[in-house]
Amino acid sequence: MCGIVGYIGKNNALPKLIKGLKRLEYRGYDSAGIAYFKNKEIILKKSVGRIANLEEKINLQDESFIGIGHTRWATHGKVVEENSHPHQVGNITLVHNGIIENYLPLKKELQEKGYSFKSETDTEVACAYLDYLLEKNKKMPFTEILKQAANTFIGSFAFVILVKGIDNQLFVLKRESPLVIGIGNKEFYVASDFQAYLEETKEYFILEDNDICQIENNALHLYREGKEIPYKTNILEDNISSPSLNNNKHYMLKEIKEQSVLISKWNKIYLEKGKELPDITKYKRIDIIACGTAYHAGLIGKYLIEKNTDFEVNVYVASEYRYQKVHLNKESLVIAISQSGETADTLSCVKLAKKNNAKTLGIINVYNSSIARICDEVIYTNAGIEVSVASTKAYTSQIYILSLLAQEFSQQKIDKNTYTTLPQKVEKLIEKDYTKIGRQLITKKDVFFLGRRIDYISMLEGSLKLKEITYIHSEAFPAGELKHGPISLIEEKTPVISLITDKTTALKTISNIKEVKARGAYVILIIKEGIVPTLDKTIYDEIITLPPSDDYTMPIISIIPLQLIAYYTALLKGVDIDKPRNLAKSVTVE
Ligand code: G6P
C-alpha cells in the first residue's frame, strides 16, 4: 500500500526522502514521487515503476531541507504519472495514504468553483479542497484549515503537506491510515511506519486519529481535539535494525530459512522461560478475524482449539465480518491475527468488537502497531521484521502461538520435546531441493492443491503462496470435494499437489489422488512418514516425506515444502519474488 515519508531538518532532504521510500518499498507500490522546497518554490518529481526510475530524474546536487515523498499503490486511476503523488493544486502540494470516500461530490463542488483536475485520483480532490479553504481563509492558521478539512473528508487518510508561502514548515493530518514521526537531532522524519527511518532514529511517536502536526526545523506542535498538547515519544529497542538479505537472493528465502532459528527462539520464550499466555478459556464465544495468510493461521487455530474440546470457534475474513451481523457481548473474545497490525479491515473489526463490548486479543507481529495499540491484550509473535510481501515466518509464528493457546485451552500437557525437535525437522525440509518440482510447474496454467481437514487448511495457504509470487492460477480443494466439480479441470499432466498428515483421512485422500492420477494428473505427494502402512508408488510422480510430529506442530512442518515450492517456481520464472505485481505487504485501505 501507499507509503509516505517527510523530512524537515538540518540535512539535505533529498537523500533522506529517497532512502525512506526505499525502506517502504516492501509495502508494494507501482509509482513514486517527491516534492521539496528550493528557493521558496516547490519542485516536483514523479515516476512510474521502481524508485530507481525516480532517482534518475532527481538532481541530488539540489539541496533542500524540507520535503515529502510517496510510493503509490493505485486505488483511484491507472498507474500513470498524472495519478502518482505528490499532487499539487495551487499553493498545496501533498502526499496521501488512504481513500477519501466523498471525493466525487467534493470534486463536483470544486469544479463548480472553477477547479480543474489532471488526475483521476481522490487525492488531487483533497489537495484542491485544501487550496480552496486556504484561498477562502487567507488569514487563518493552516492547522485550522486542516481541522476544517478533516471535518469534511470521509474515509481514511494520512497526509503530509507542503504549503507554498510557508517554506519552513511541514504539515501532517491523519485518520485511520498509520503515520509515525521520528525525532532526530533538530530534525523530524514522517513515515507510514518506523522502518523507513530505523537507522536515523529510534525515538518516535505515533499519531492518533484526527491529529494535526505543524513541524518546524526544531519544534513540533501537536494539535488534538483543537488544542495543542505535548507529545510523548517512545524509544524502539536497540536490537531492532533494518533488515538485510544476509547473502540470500530474496527476503522470502531468507525469511523461510529463518523459521528454524525462530522456533528455537519461541521455545526459549514460551517453554523455557514460561512466558504466560492470556487465559482464553473464560469466554462463551471466540471469533477469530484476519485477512490473507493470517486468516489461514486463524483456521488452523480453530482446528487446534476444537480438536480436544467441545468448544466451537468461529473464523471470519475481516473484510466480511466488519459488515455482517455479529453476535458479541461481554462474554465474547475477538482474536485479531495480523502480521503488520495495520490491515484496515482487521482494525475495523477490532473496533466493532469493542463497540459490542467484546474483549479483544491481538496476535500481532509489529510492535505498537495500530491493532496492537487498541486491543485489550496482545501476544507479539516475535518473528522479526518480515519484508517479503508473501508472508512465511509470520504465518508459522502465528500457528506456534495458536498451538500453545489451543493446548492450554483444552488443558493438554504441552509436549516440550516435540517443540524442541521442531527446528531440526524444519531445517531438514528447508535443505531439500525443490527445483525439480518448480520446473514441472513453471509452464503450467493451473495447479491444484488437495488435502483434508487440517491439511486442506495448509493447502489453502500453499496455494495462496504459489499464486501470489508465481502468477500461476492455483486453487485448494478439500480432497473429498473433488468429485463435485473440480475434477473436470484435471487433464493430462495437470499438477496436483496433495498433503497427507491427518491419519484419520489418509486413506480417503489416497483414493482421491488415485482418481486424479487415473485422469493423467502429475501428482506431487507431501506425506507424513509412516502414516500409511504401505504406500502405492504408482500414485505419485514426486514425493516429499515429512518427519513425524504431533497434530499441534505438524502444520508448522507441512507448510515449509509448500513455501519453498512456491519460491523455487517463482525463481525459475524469473519474477520479482519479494514484490509481486499488484500486491502490498500492508493493506491499509478497505
Ligand atoms: C496482505 C499481505 C499478506 C497478508 C495480508 C494480511 O495481503 O500481502 O501477506 O497475509 O495482507 O496482513 P496482516 O498484516 O494483517 O497479517
Image (spheres, helix red, strand yellow):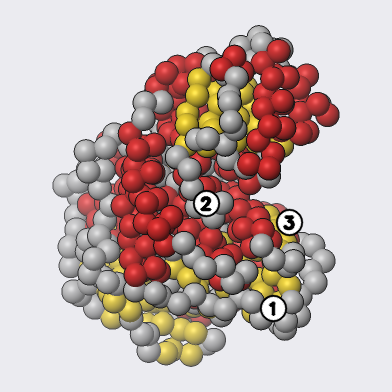
Q: Which residue is mark 2?
A: 550
Nearer the camera: disc 2 or disc 1? 2
> Would you say the residues marked 3 and 1 are in contact, meaning their CB atoms lie under 8 Å apart?
no
The residue that appears at 65% across and 55% down in the rendered structure is 303
Dot placed on the residue nearer the N-terminal end, 2 or 1: 1
The secondary structure type at the circle numbered 1 is loop
Residue 283: numbered disc: 1
Q: Is residue 529 left or right of residue 336?
A: left
Q: Quadrant of residue 125?
A: bottom right
Identify the amino acid type marked 3: Glu
Identify the amino acid type marked 2: Asp
Decide which of 438, 522 is in the foreground and name it.
522
**Cα–Cα gap, marks 3 and 2:** 33 Å
Crowdedness near tag 1: few (<14), some (14–19) or many (≥20) residues, C-alpha within 10 Å: some
Residue 543 place in picture, x, y as percent: 50, 24
Identify the amino acid type marked 1: Tyr
Q: Is residue 171 above or below residue 522?
A: below
Residue 320: numbered disc: 3
Residue 237 place in picture, x, y as percent: 27, 71
Dot placed on the residue nearer the N-terminal end, 3 or 2: 3
The verdict on label 1 being within 8 Å of ligand 1 is: no
The secondary structure type at the circle numbered 2 is loop
